[in-house]
Image (cartoon, rainbow, N blue to C red):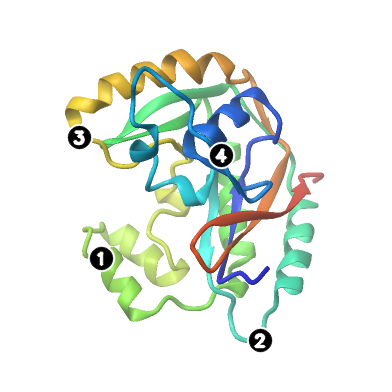
Amino acid sequence: MTFTRYAIYFAPPHGAAWSQFGASWLGWDMETGEALPHPEVNGLDVAAITATPRKYGLHATMKPPMRLAEGTSRADLEAACAALAATQAPVTLEGLQLARLGRFLALRPVGDESALNALAAACVRDLDAFRAPAPEAELARRRANGLSPEQDQNLVTWGYPYVLDQFRFHITLTGKLPKPELPSVEAALQAHLIPLLPAPLVIKDLALMGEDTEGRFHLIHRYALTG
């Protein structure tokens, strides 16, 4: 398969109950590359609620999507991912909780995030040689949303505003929702997803992802954290 961009994700374990529900909720299984039927949940229009995050799959971004830099290859990136994973230890979180990020709903960590943030920072820094510079149009589009000086510097240096000190680990579950809809969607996720979440949650690997020509992300390979 031809991929237009690559990213590094935390991808929940395939086959775990919460991962299966989350993939169905979004309607996309990035591990198998298959569309999934949405669950019937409290009369909600799950397809509409999840339209924006669907193509990315159930994940947390560790290094944002990037085009390959000139002179690099997918094979080079795969080798670098393996080398990076060999230097990093698994990360244990107390668990995950449902949170509002503005008008989006997402899963956020419970407890200390320092080891998790350090892992994400290593992904951003150590793999940046593979990132082609962002086109000016993309920079302008991101700046149009309003960035702090720190976020703008990250955009210039790393190609994305919300990395390093601006990083917040999150697993996106919805698009931007009208405020009146937030409580009912929260209630549905609290009832159907939250009871399935593991506590603690151990992040054991990094997932190299590829974006296909239609914008959907597929799992290429998992690299065990063995450092």
| Residue ID at (27%, 61%) | 149
For disc 1, the marked residue is 143
The foreground one among 79 and 28 is: 28
Q: Position of residue 199 (x, y in %)?
A: 62, 18
Mark closer to the chain start, 3 or 2: 2
Contact (CB < 8 A) between labels 1 and 2? no
For disc 2, the marked residue is 71
For disc 3, the marked residue is 178
Mark closer to the chain start, 4 or 2: 4
Mark closer to the chain start, 1 or 3: 1
Which type of secondary structure does the marked residue at label 1 adopt? helix
For disc 4, the marked residue is 36
> Which amino acid lies under the numbered mark 4 shown in the image of this protein?
Leu
The Cα atoms of the two marked residues, 4 and 3, are separated by: 25 Å
Contact (CB < 8 A) between labels 3 and 2? no
The Cα atoms of the two marked residues, 4 and 2, are separated by: 37 Å
